[in-house]
Image (cartoon, rainbow, N blue to C red):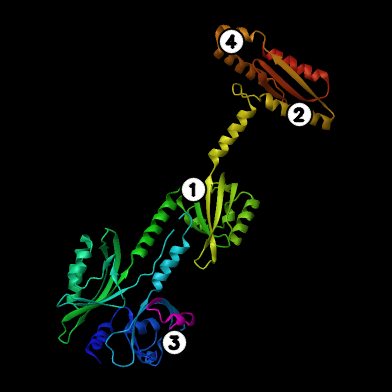
Amino acid sequence: MPETYRRFRSAFTGATIGVAVIDGSGRLTYANESLCRISGYEESELYRMKFTELLHPGDRAAIGSFTNERRLLTKAGGVVWVQTSLTIPGGQAGPTEVIAFVEDISERKQVEEAVRASEHSFRIAAENASDIIYEWDLRTGEVDVFGLHHPCLGDWPAPRNYEAWKSMLHPEDRERLTGRAQLIRNGEAYSDEYRIVGRSGKIYRYSDRGRAIRNASGVPYKCVGALSDITADRQAGEAISQLAAILQCSQDIIVATDTAGAITSWNDGAQQLLGYTAAEALALSITALFISAGPARRLLSLIHQGQSSRLDEALFLRRNGSQVPVLLSVSPIRQSDGQLTGSAIVARDISARKQTEREIAHHALHDHLTGLPNRLFLADLLADSIASANREASGTAVIFVDLDGFRFINDTLGHEAGDALLQQVAQRLSTHVRHGDRLARMGGDEFMLVVNDVTEDQAALSVAARLGEALR
């Protein structure tokens, strides 16, 4: 075996990623400890297998790819996501052998899946990072790179010596190299994260994992390790943190449910508006927040079907028993494969809007000065009274009140005095109106009273007399 291979196999025996050598027939002729750990097979068992036997049947067709993500079948029957990088060493005399670098990326896959599951307000791109496998000669400072045709560090070509790599580091991260140097001198494994300052000033983040290799004298003479580009992962984590902060700071109700309608997340805006703590809300169904069963059933149907929709108005029940009107929208939450996992619900308090609508409606039908029904409202009141009289075989009387000399007051004392007089007249008349009768201001100094349930003329005349007495 050439010296290069002996050095290579020695270097990767304790590497943190799986390394295998595959002969021309596809069988494993070398497997390191990490590959045994990932697969669950003993080293001797791996030597009796072909590399493709370790792969999920659906991933075997892509074995010719140099770098890919595949599912590795463990001895226990489980599946582990790995990233494999294949290379064919040069200068071989005899059947071609392939070197396979196998990294367990299950954790990264879980992170990517978590990123894909959190998206409705806000977009995260997850990229697969290809590792750079390096061998660093501690005596000369030279660095050999394995596994990739054109490896880069950020937007820089992969450095070929330690000083070049050190110069790429963010100045604040260089200070931590002292601690790593001590681990290397002790022949221990090291792991850290560093920022690389790109040519354009962009910051790239890398995870550096490696181990010092000792010579026969027990002195560390080289390091073997892997650099993983974790920029996308860190950006995704920061995006998730930013999104979570935005959701928590929002004054709107923002919650998530599972497909059955059970609440799975609850923001601060929901707690402030409805009074339920997150612990209390997570024990509830979303339907428990509704006053009426109809809107609750409609929302639950939308959740079950994974549909997006909007409810222009619904009533939510606060923890203290009071009600709050909300504008509500619902959107489905799906995994990357399209599987429905629940729904995101955003509800906005529209109490102020409803109050404004009520005020507008009131102003449209009432006199702004006296607060009495206006001419428009009086027409409806009179129509209702006549219809009721027809049903009850009774009658309706209309009493017209006009103020004599009102123009003289306006002309001599001013409109403010006239307005004050009209308000006093409205108050006096209102105190002498029977329950069920309706007093309205027609405009100017004219008022009209609709007297309901009149069975005889004398009843209406008595009401008119009381009104006249009220104005004396």
Residue at image location 50% in from the left, 55% down from the top: 255
Judging from the image, what secondary structure is the residue with disc 3 in?
Answer: helix
**Residue where numbered disc 3 is placed:** 53
Residue at image location 59% in from the left, 58% down from the top: 307
Judging from the image, what secondary structure is the residue with disc 4 in?
Answer: helix
- Distance, label 1 to label 3, CA atoms, is 53 Å
**Residue where numbered disc 1 is placed:** 252
**Residue where numbered disc 2 is placed:** 383
Q: Are marks 3 and 4 in contact (CB under 8 Å)?
A: no
- Distance, label 1 to label 4, CA atoms, is 51 Å
Residue 325 vs 205, above or below: the answer is above
Residue 49 vs 294, above or below: the answer is below
Which stretch did the figure color magenta?
53-68
Horizontally, residue 287 falls left or right of residue 13, namely right
Number of callouts in the render? 4
Q: Nearer the viewer, residue 338 or 163?
A: 163
Judging from the image, what secondary structure is the residue with disc 1 in?
Answer: loop
